[in-house]
Image: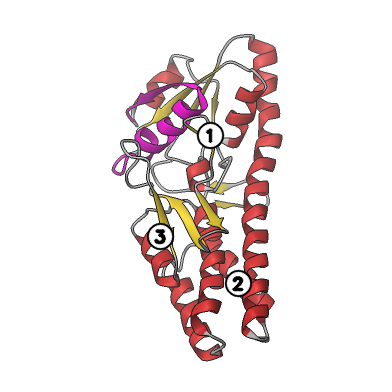
């Protein structure tokens, strides 16, 4: 997605420096700053401080943390396993963190020579990052059809309400809840987004609003309790939010704010 009209990801591997770079989300919207992460400990600290946040972004960071663990352990399998356990236990409820870490670690069942292990770990981390981002894009490809159908029926700007930040900052690129919004915007469907402020950390007011501004999408920040009034006044056509868990039958579960 865009930052000052430049395509950007929220977390990415930099080949030239061999670092993991990430947007420091704690400084937004008032400062745009990237941080360079070089070790497993750096990545754990960034996740715990919420400089990196959002399930897919955390999963991507964890996959690269395993690459750094391979570099740090220097072929010492016991030390590698300690680093891996430390990483996974840093956020035990974060499914994507575990998934990203094990996606890379399982490709290293038998530690080969150091250079081969590093090369394979980096390939797998890059692979996992692209998979996560592609999954988000697919959510957008499927979800945009709902927005298209509403627009076809109403022939006016579509009012969408969203809560918290399930956007590209949380996912590396595209976002989950926001992916259909971005694709709709890029197909010239007129949109207006109601952005819940999302107390107490204000991820909506700070992060989702910042994303919308950079993409050039019309939006209004509202208090969390205003959503009900807007729905009652028929000013919301669609609600799109993130979910921590989605069951096979379509049931969803997320934090109490949503």
How far apart marks 2 and 1 lie (CA) works out to 32 Å
| Nearer to me, 91 or 126 | 126
Q: Are marks 2 and 1 in contact (CB under 8 Å)?
A: no
Q: Position of residue 100 (x, y in %)?
A: 58, 64
Q: Nearer the viewer, mark 2 or mark 1?
A: 1
Kindly identify which residue carries mark 2.
102
| Nearer to me, 22 or 212 | 22
> Is 190 inside the magenta-drawn segment?
no
Q: State which quarter of the image contains the N terminus.
A: top right
The tag earlier along the polypeptide, 2 or 1, is: 1
Q: Residue furthest front?
A: 16
| Nearer to me, 197 or 104 | 104
Q: Residue at x 33, y 58 (%)?
A: 49
Q: Position of residue 182 (x, y in %)?
A: 59, 30
Q: Dot 1 lies on which element?
A: strand
Question: Could you say which quadrant of the image residue 228 lies in?
Answer: top left
Q: Is residue 123 left or right of residue 54?
A: right
The tag earlier along the polypeptide, 2 or 3, is: 3
How far apart marks 1 and 3 lie (CA) works out to 25 Å
Kindly identify which residue carries mark 1.
6
Magenta region, residue range: 199-223
Q: Position of residue 78 (x, y in %)?
A: 52, 90
């Amino acid at each position: 997605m865009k930052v000052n009209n430049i395509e950007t990801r929220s977390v990415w591997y930099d080949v030239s420096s061999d670092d993991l770079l990430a947007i420091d989300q704690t400084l937004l919207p008032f400062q745009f700053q990237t941080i360079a992460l070089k070790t497993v400990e750096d990545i754990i600290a960034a996740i715990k401080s919420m400089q990196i946040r959002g399930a897919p972004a955390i999963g991507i960071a964890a996959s690269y943390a395993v690459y750094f663990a391979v570099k740090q352990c220097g072929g010492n399998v016991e030390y590698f396993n300690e680093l891996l356990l430390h990483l996974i236990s840093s956020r035990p409820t974060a499914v994507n963190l575990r998934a990203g870490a094990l996606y890379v670690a399982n490709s290293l069942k038998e530690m080969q020579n150091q250079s081969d292990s590093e090369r394979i770990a980096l390939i797998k981390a890059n692979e996992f990052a692209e998979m996560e981002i592609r999954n988000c894009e697919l959510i957008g490809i499927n979800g945009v059809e709902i927005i298209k159908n509403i627009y076809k029926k109403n022939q006016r700007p579509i009012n969408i309400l969203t809560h918290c930040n399930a956007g590209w900052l949380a996912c590396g690129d595209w976002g989950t809840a926001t992916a259909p919004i971005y694709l709709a915007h890029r197909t010239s469907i007129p949109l207006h987004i109601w952005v819940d402020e999302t107390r107490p950390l204000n991820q909506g007011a700070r992060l989702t609003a910042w994303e919308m501004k950079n993409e050039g999408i019309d939006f209004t920040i509202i208090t969390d309790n205003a959503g009900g009034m807007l729905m009652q006044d028929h000013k919301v056509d669609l609600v799109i939010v993130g979910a921590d868990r989605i069951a096979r039958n379509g049931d969803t579960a997320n934090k109490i704010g949503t």
